[in-house]
Image (tube, rainbow, N blue to C red):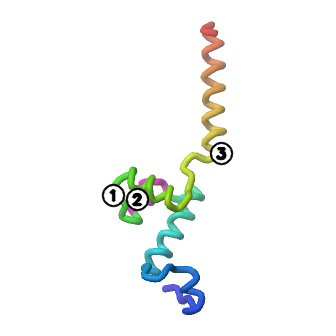
Amino acid sequence: MIEIPDDLATALVAPGSDAARVALEALALEAYRERRLTGFQLRTLLGIPSRFELYDFLNEHKVERYTLEDFGHDLDTIQKLEEARKAKGLA
């Protein structure tokens, strides 16, 4: 249970929105951004039926799925594969 003064609640939650759902989505999105939740866990928690709908939900909330860390990992993998290819004389 979270208590929010009425004057601040109107600034946090759009009229007609379910405050509990808004709070749950905000907590879940932050955990996803920090990689404490996987996409599957996020879908399960929020009751999102498919990964395509999850992608739509993430796009609506301006959450990038491909991070700079992901890029660095991919770049390392490409470099290792290139080194292995050269070592086998496939250059």
Q: Earlier in the sequence, mark 1 or mark 3?
A: 1
Image position, residue 35 (x, y; %): 56, 55
Q: Residues within 10 Å of mark 1 (few under 14, many from 20)?
A: few
Residue under label 2, please give it.
43
Amino acid type, residue under disc 1 in the picture: Pro
For disc 1, the marked residue is 49
Residue marked by disc 3: 68
Q: Position of residue 64 (x, y in %)?
A: 57, 52
Say if the magenta span includes residue 32.
Answer: no
Callout 2: SS: helix
Quadrant of the image occupied by residue 54: bottom left
Q: Amino acid at mark 2?
A: Arg
Badge 3 marks a residue whose secondary structure is helix
Chief SS of the magenta region? helix
Per the model, the C-alpha gap separating discs 1 and 3 is 28 Å
Rounded to the nearest angstrom, the CA distance separating label 1 from label 2 is: 7 Å
Disc 2 and disc 3 in contact, CB within 8 angstroms? no
